[in-house]
Image (tube, helix red, strand yellow):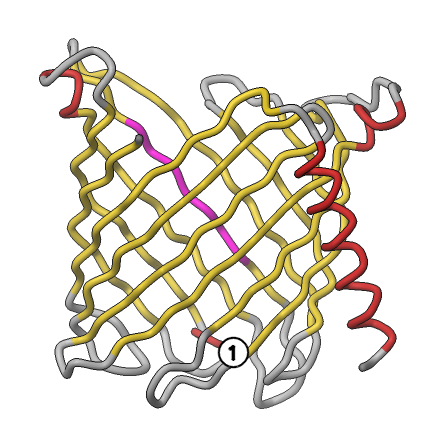
Amino acid sequence: MKLKKIVALGALASAAALTQASPVVWQDFSLTGLYGENYELGTDERTTLTAEYAAKLKYADVFFFLDQQWDNKGDDNTYLELAPRLSLGEVTGQNLSFGPVKDVLIATTWEHNAGHGANAEFNNFLYGVGFALDIPYTQYANINFYKADNDLQKDDYQMTITYAVPFKIGSEEFLADAFLDWSTGEGADHKSELNWTSQYKWNVGKHISPETRLYLGIEHSIWNNKFGTNVDQHDVSALVKYHF
């Protein structure tokens, strides 16, 4: 095993272990169903079931999701990400805030594709530094900078931005949240890529009960140079999401 993979695994394992040991401040689990017809690299029509877990702990935060995807030819694929981050401010007891930054974190991510059918199995390990941001009108905002140790292509660097913006139209509640991944190009066979995937959701659950969090909406995906190729994807999927 390469030294950089050992470093990446060590950073991920350390962050995950400290995350698990920390008292839970809050946590959230949700299931999302998606259906879209404009996917690229494979069949264009796909149905996806996504399980997500997010938590804030005393010394860390963690995000996990698993996608189970089926296409219109009966093939399926499983993909997951585990992304624990360790708060340097909370571990050291120091105030590391400056400008819009409210905390500095060690950021790690494990990307795993199960490799069903024609899809190749891979494990990518990302490690770097993250910043929790205090931006007006957002529910949360984060930016991470990673070095990526990739299985199937040349190693590269990645920037990930996540944010959520709640808003109201009249008495109706909505949420716009998204992630943006940008990675560097590493040679002619691995172009720089950008994936901006956003969800726009209406909280229909409040009409069932005040505690019900059931959302209807769409997911909009703009993916330039998908997987480092010359292929661009522009897809809008129908969405239903339930938080337990």
Rendering coords of residue 164 (x, y %): 43, 31
12 or 147: nearer the eye?
12
* Residue depicted at x 69% and y 71%: 156
Rendering coords of residue 117 (x, y %): 33, 87
Tag 1, which secondary structure? helix
Name above or below for residue 171 compared with residue 18: above
Rendering coords of residue 54 (x, y %): 49, 37
37 or 118: nearer the eye?
118
Q: Amino acid at mark 1?
A: Gly
Task: Specify whether 69 is left or right of 207.
Answer: right
152 or 78: nearer the eye?
78
Name above or below for residue 40 compared with residue 213: below
Magenta segment includes 234 = no
User: Which residue is at the far front?
Assistant: 21
Task: Specify whether 70 is left or right of 160.
Answer: left
**Residue 1, quarter of the rendered image:** bottom right
Q: State whether the magenta stretch is mostly helix, strand or loop.
A: strand
User: Which residue is at the far left?
Assistant: 207
Which stretch did the figure color magenta?
Answer: 175-181
Name above or below for residue 120 compared with residue 126: below
**Residue 28, quarter of the rendered image:** top left
**Viewport quadrant of the C terminus:** top left
Tag 1 residue: 228
* Residue depicted at x 33% and y 39%: 30
Rendering coords of residue 36 (x, y %): 17, 62
* Residue depicted at x 31% and y 28%: 175
225 or 121: nearer the eye?
121
Disc 1 crowd rating (10 Å Cα; few below 14, some 14-19, many 20+) is: many
